Image: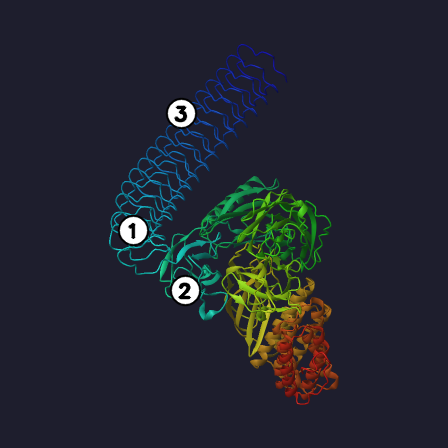
Amino acid sequence: AEPSVEPSAGPSARPSVPPSLEPSAGPSAEPSEAPSLEPSSLPSLEPSPEPSNIATENPSTAPSVEPTSLPSQAPSAEPSGSPTVQPSVSPSTVPSLEPSALPSSRPSFSPSVGPSSTPSTTPSSLPTAGPSEGPSNQPSEGPTSEPSVEPTHLPTLMPSSQPSHGPSSAPSGSPTFEPTFTASEDPTALPTSLPSVLPTGAPSQLPSSGPTLEPSFGPSFTPTLSPSAMPSDGPSQSPSSRPTALQSEQPSTGPSVAPSVLPSSLPSFSPSSAPSDAPSMPSLEPTPAEPSSAPSGVPSSAPTASARPTLLPTLSAMPSFEPSTQPTTEDPPSLVSAIFSSDGSSISLTLRADTDTPTPGDVAGDFACDFLLFTELLGADPRCRWEQEDVLLIIPDGANGASILPFDVLTLRGGIVTVGDVLAVEESVVVEEPDVISAPELALSAPATIGICDTATIVLSATDTGGREFATLEWNFVDFVCDDQVPEDVEAASRTAAIERYQTLADVRSYEIVVDQDVAPGCTLTFEAVVRTFLGGTSDIPHSITRVRDATPVILIDGGLQQSLLRRYETSLSIASASLNSTCEAVEDLGTPTFSFELTGVDPEIEGFDGSFSMRQLLVPPFSFAASTIYIFNITSTATTATFSGASTQQVEITVGRGELIPIIEDGDRIVGNATAVLLSACDSEDEDEESFLPELYNFSWACEGCSDAQVLPTGLGECELSLLTDSVSEAQVFVTIFDPASNRTATEVTSLQIRNQTLPDVTVSVDGPLPFALGLRFSRRQGFAAIDGTITPPPQSPDALLDPVWTIDGSDGSSIALSEAAFLSPSALTLSVNLGSSAFAPGVTYSFTLTALPADGETVIDQASASIALTVNQAPIGGQVVSTPTTGGPLSTIFTWTTSLWSDPEQDLPIRYSFAFEVNQNGVVLALEAGDFQLDTTIEVRGLPSGTIDVFATAQDVLGAHSRVETDIFVAAPLETGPELVGVIEDFLDAGLDVATLEDDSEEALNVVLISASQYNSAVEDSLLDDTEARNLTGRIVAEALTIFDTFNGSAELVDPVISTFAAVIDESADGCGLAPDVILDMVTEIGDGLLQAVIDSGVPPSDDTLAAVLDVLGDLSGCGVINTSEQTGAAPIILAFTRAMDQFALAAGVGQIASVVRTFEGERLAFAVSRQTAESIGEFAPSVNVGPTVRRRLSRRMRDLQSATNTFSVSFSSGIGDAA
């Protein structure tokens, strides 16, 4: 256990198998012939003069302080954790497979013949005198401080992240595939024969003496200080943003496509044979010869010696010191840049000045890009919108043929957009790739465990792919293992079959694979999907599937077993599907199963979370998780039949990321007076990870450009306010930076103060309370109404001045919104109630809500003071497509699979959730149905669709509620059965569907089944496939089921729409005598009215326009039944009461007009009168409780007279709230 103090003079011929725990202080004079099998935990202080002939299998955990003078012939298989301080004079002939984590401070004088397969994390400070024959497979994280005298014959595939300070004296034959981000200080004496595919982010300080034979594809971001002695034969396709400090003696034979942004201070002595396609900024000194065909953006200080001017003028308003002898003939270039977004889903086109933001028909929002651009590379229907007056956002149609890539050319149509005050001509710009390319977000829908009879379909979905199909998609085999109970021959055969089957999938570009019986019971297959986008963003996602030896519940979790989210948003873990296979010989007929689900563990635990499932869904409230934490949820599913009970457990991994800090400076940009104390506050900023913002937990740092040097700028924890005294400057920019010490997050916001040289009123603006569907001041149009409060305080020298508040709404795209379009004022006019859900607000645009104080008497003694707050409209997911498999089928039998894909969210409000719906017009009756709630999975299976051409919709919604919709269509053939056989088919479908829905406690699914049955009934009656008795009986059954479901679930608001649609589907075809008993009709009318009223009371959300229209249509159909009498008139009361209560002051008059329009079509006079009377009474009760302005009052009066005219018998006294106006 303990070594001797001094070692023996010579070692033993054979060492002990285990070494002593600690080595002797000094080594023996010679090493043993063979080392111990395991080394001592620590080496001797000095090594033996020579190593043993054979290396130990594993090294000691730490090396000796100094190495042996000669290394062992072959190194140990695994290196020590740390290297020796001094290396051996000669290295081993073959290196270890992996190097030590840290290298020695100095390398050995000569390297090993071959390098290690993986380099050290940090290289030695000095390299070997000569390099190894070949490089390691991967480079070290950082290079040596000085390079080797000669480079390796072959370079590494990837370079180190930082280059060495100086290069090798001669370069390698071929460069690395990608260069280092920054260049070495000095270049090699000679260049490589071929350049790297991409240049370095910055060049070396001095260039190589000669250029590469061919130029790089793109230039470095900044050029070398001096050019190479001779230029390359041809230039890069695009130049560096700045030129070299000194010009080359001789130009390249041809120019680059576009010039440097800034030119060299002096031109080359001789110009290139032809100019670049676009001009650069000019040199300080002009060329002595002829001008280029196009000028630079600003003129040179002196013109060219030529008397001939350029064909195009310069951009600058400043002329040359001396004019050209002839005038220029064309307008300056309009396009500055076109850059892909990080995920490639959009392109931002920047113009050189503000434009008139033209759109087709001057319609705000999205428009077809071919109005402004040539769109050959942008797909079938690319969309554009103005985000700012000088920025056009382009969304290529990735689902339909978009093929534009970085370095492609985008061309603006001429004669449409005015840039500055010049009408732009046709012009092109090269599209640039983004600074940061984002990786796609991947999800796999797949079970972790399958039964002995099951197959598993693994479905891949992705977001942030740039709205296009994957550039590459590979399914890679990773591993195959079996438990101890599997015989070796069975494991070997199953492994061989799995490898042969799944390794070939690497070339299959499919969104799904199927795992079948190749995986033997007791074995686990592991594979991965690897995806690369067209911009090069790459992600991979692994998955393992285990086959058990008997039947087991197979469950799929919505969104897959690996999910990512932020703690700010509610999370739902939902069971997408559950099944129990009992169809193979190995498992007897188990019968119909019932399923239960239980959360059997969460690691780490969540305080106060009970984890109970409700209708296959586990809800986790917002802010339950901790940020930057990975949670493991164990979800156990139990399947029970008359003869079987079995359970399986799935592990769901939820990664909770870090949210953003969102600084908010109250009152926004302001116009203030001189010598005025202004209080700026960032105390109501937001942290996406916290339910409430506590300023004392954050560090605030204030800065000001344009403020007096005497201004105190606080910094520290909780310093969220700045008291600023304005001085005579015309403008000040105030910055606040918030730092979170707990997470090292930081964010900065700026506000502008326009300072007038007099004392002004004090104006402030703020949003009343946090917006529920918003992140900071970026809101979703799901928002509804919000109040923006303002204050106006007269200046001290005029405390009694009468000031009028004036509100304006201006967009960053140059638009202005009239208050009547989206807002109304409080009586004081200091509060602006804004309908943030109005279509007047365009996605992606920032709107400034500005309050200005104007003298009420019209005098201008007091200058205008104002304050504004800027709110940005959240952008909905973009791109997207929906595909149906198959696209044709039969009713009640064909299973359709609908898949949506190719979505991206411009502002990364992830995850995106999806819902599906369909709509079919059957003989004038529009049947619309939601096919499922919003879910993470991108696929849904649907059966029992109605006959006809069906529009299929997929909606994508981000976490703030912004959503977009895409559609396709399919065809469902009419049923082949007739008469009693058809009645039997519909009733069998109805019975089976209701059984499943009842089993799963799913009211919406139950109503879907009833609605589909009603649709099939509707088609059968239209096609005369049923006689009167069959039709009447089936109608009664369908209506009774709908009413039963509605009553069972207490008339909840979400059931109103499908119930109304069901009634509309069956009643329309039963108008002749209605086909229903009077008591059924009364039940229907009463249930509809009560349901609508309860929906409004419970949710506070008005019924949709479609629902209200359907209600009135049903009433119109029922009016022909001939059974409406005084007792039935009461059925209309709750309907109209719900209708009017759901209206705000904008919808009230329109709603009455809608009722009047329907009343005109009523055939039953008594129902018409009942509706009219109830409308008047409800408005009399409701209208006084809302703020009905004069304009609305006039509209309401007109609509009430319309209603009176429609009934002729209309006569009622209105309450005082609207009596005069009516």
Q: Which amino acid does label 2 sit on?
A: Val
Residue on which disc 3 sits: 129
Percent of width and height locating residue 117: 46, 33
Q: Looking at the image, is 629 positioned above or below residue 464?
A: above
Residue on which disc 1 sits: 303
- Where, quadrant-wise, is the C terminus in this rendering? bottom right
- Where, quadrant-wise, is the N terminus in this rendering? top right
Sequence-wise, the earlier of marks 1 and 3 is 3
Where residue 1203 sits, quadrant-wise, is bottom right
Percent of width and height locating residue 115: 44, 30
Compared across the picture, whether 94 is left or right of 683 comes to left
Percent of width and height locating residue 185: 40, 34
Percent of width and height locating residue 1129: 72, 83
Name the residue rendered at 28%, 39% in the picture. 230
Q: Distance between the residues labelled 2 and 1?
A: 31 Å
Rate crowding at label 2 as few (under 14), some (14 to 19) or many (20 or more) other CA atoms within 10 Å: many
Q: What residue type is labelled 1?
A: Pro
Compared across the picture, whether 781 is left or right of 51 comes to right
Sequence-wise, the earlier of marks 3 and 2 is 3
Which one is in front in this view, the residue at disc 3 or the one at disc 2? 2
Q: Looking at the image, is 101 positioned above or below residue 212?
A: above
